[in-house]
Amino acid sequence: MITSQVEYTDFSKSSVLRSVATLCNSEEETAILTLYDNGTIRECNQAAAELLDCVPNNLTWQHISIIMPQLAESTLMQGEKINPNLRFLSHIGYGFEVVGLSGIHFACALFFNEVENFGRHCLRLIIRPIVQEPTQA
């Protein structure tokens, strides 16, 4: 059995990334991807591009698994609804592995929302980096 060790970035040590990770007051500051029901990235906003270390056009038309390997074999939608397992993991704040285009691995909570675009079901994916608060000794 082959195992690999993945290193996660601690956002609490990076002031630039920490500012992205804090709760956002506007949609412009929140990392958001819009996905087709087959997992293809339809849109990437500027906040998501900064978090993932790319320009928005680099992600458009790519499969979500390019940045979220755990979703490679997952069905995002079941019929017209979000996969119940993904909805549950999102609800409990499960830390999904995210890989920025620069190769940095980090953990994020994902929030899935169903949206309709010109009669086609899409997903709006909100990405929130998981920040470990410094512990007091």
Image (tube, rainbow, N blue to C red):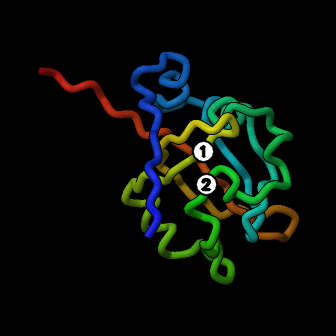
Q: Are marks 1 and 2 in contact (CB under 8 Å)?
A: yes
- Mark sitting on residue 99: 1
- Res. 16 image quadrant: top right
The reply, left or right, for residue 48 in relation to residue 17 is: right
Residue at the far bottom: name it: 79
- Residue labelled with disc 2: 68
The answer to whether residue 28 is visible is: no
In the image, what residue occupies the spot 60% across and 45% down?
99
Question: What's the residue type where badge 2 is placed?
Answer: Met
Question: Which corner quadrant holds the C terminus?
Answer: top left
Residue at the far front: name it: 1
In the image, what residue occupies the spot 77% across and 55% down?
41
Question: What's the residue type where badge 1 is placed?
Answer: Val
- Could you say which is closer to the camera, residue 136 or residue 43? 136
The reply, left or right, for residue 71 in relation to residue 108 is: right
Q: Is residue 135 above or below residue 97?
A: above
Q: Is residue 39 above or below residue 126?
A: below
Q: Is residue 52 above or below residue 1?
A: above
Q: Position of residue 89 (x, y in %)?
A: 43, 64
Q: Position of residue 8 (x, y in %)?
A: 45, 39
